[in-house]
Amino acid sequence: MKWTDVQQIAEELYDQHPDVDPRTIRFIDLHNFVVGLEDFDDDHSRGGEKVLEAIQAAWIAEAE
């Protein structure tokens, strides 16, 4: 997975962290969750605020 795979990342986060409320997660924690995904294979430094916001929004939608 790459940073651009926003929906796939959100689905993985939803499955792996069912007790986490994506509406209240801090971006540093979200970043750590993403780079910790087993299939994630991208430059860790490319996970900026815009992509994290998109992942968070997709995760919220997945959780609803």
Image: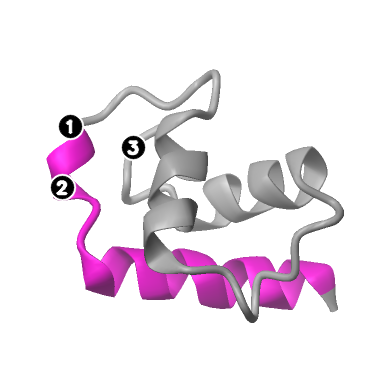
Q: Name the residue tied to disc 2.
A: 46
| Number of dots carrying numbers | 3
- Residue tagged by mark 1? 43
Mark 3 — residue? 2
Q: Decide which of tag 1 and tag 3 comes sooner along the chain.
A: 3
The CA distance from mark 2 to mark 1 is: 6 Å
Residues shaded magenta: 44-63
Of the pair 8 and 32, the residue shown nearer to us = 32
Number of residues whose C-alpha sits closer than 10 Å to that of mark 2, classed few (under 14), some (14–19) or many (20 or more): few
The kind of secondary structure element at disc 3 is loop
Q: Is residue 57 left or right of residue 53?
A: right
The residue drawn where x is 48% and y is 64% is: 55
Q: How far from the left and from the top, in percent, is residue 15?
A: 80, 43
Q: Amino acid at mark 1?
A: Asp
- Percent coordinates x, y for residue 42 in the rendering: 25, 29
The quadrant of the image that shows the N terminus is: top left
SS type, badge 1: loop
Labelled pair 2, 1 in contact (Cβ < 8 Å): yes
Pointer 3 or 2: first along the chain: 3
